[in-house]
Image (cartoon, rainbow, N blue to C red):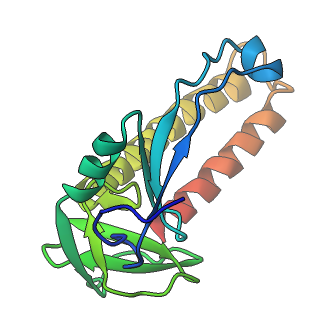
Amino acid sequence: MSKPEVLPCPFCGAEPLMREIEPHTHSGPLKALGIPDHPGSHVIECGCGAGMIAEAKQAVRDMWNRRKMYSYVQPRAGVPDVAGYDVFESESCSHVLLLPEEIAKVRLRLSASATALIRLTDHETARAADKARIAELEAALKAVKSYIQYGPHGAHPALEAIAAIDAALSQQGKEGET
């Protein structure tokens, strides 16, 4: 491995390393799954887990170096805590960064394309969709319980299973509120 001519890691500020993955053929379970042979690639990676891969050395350098950079700060009120992570927010409030607690917070300059970034709007949309789905499931469950309990056949053995589903939905709703 050699030091690439690239920008510092956007997560921790350290100098990333470049390495080459030689072309190789797959065997055993990978071959059985139909995984094609690997043509070879170049990787830029950092000890904190950030990395990129491309077939050509210059392509991976270009991808690493052209990322838009953001500056991150402590999050505003209302951004949820995540167990095991330090939470930061972009100054524009458009992205949240989750850094594992053990990573040193050095020069928090981060890539918009990094997988650890979550658009707040996407998070809020997903949360609203989850709440709507829970409400839909609760309404369907209520209708099914009513039919089974008071329908033409009287009480049904499936009521225990429905009670378990009902309890799980209630718990999911409580977890979603926190």
At horizontal 28% and vertical 68% (from top left) the residue drawn is 7
Compare residues 139 and 112 and report the one nearer the observer.
Answer: 112
Task: Residue 101: give x, y in percent of width and height.
Answer: 55, 82
- Name of the residue lying farthest toward the right: 157
Task: Residue 127: give x, y in percent of width and height.
Answer: 38, 53
Q: State which quarter of the image contains the N terminus.
A: bottom right
Compare residues 129 and 5 and report the one nearer the observer.
Answer: 5
- Name of the residue lying farthest toward the left: 92
Judged left or right of residue 113, residue 43 is right
- Name of the residue lying farthest toward the front: 2
Count the marks: 0
Task: Residue 99: give x, y in percent of width and height.
Answer: 47, 74
Residue 120 versus residue 164 in the image, above or below: below
At horizontal 43% and vertical 67% (from top left) the residue drawn is 16
Question: In the picture, residue 54 is in which quadrant?
Answer: top left
At horizontal 41% and vertical 74% (from top left) the residue drawn is 15
Residue 176 versus residue 22 in the image, above or below: below
Judged left or right of residue 32, residue 137 is left
Question: In the picture, residue 51 is in which quadrant?
Answer: bottom left
At horizontal 70% and vertical 51% (from top left) the residue drawn is 167
Task: Residue 6: give x, y in percent of width and height.
Answer: 30, 63
Compare residues 162 and 172 and report the one nearer the observer.
Answer: 172
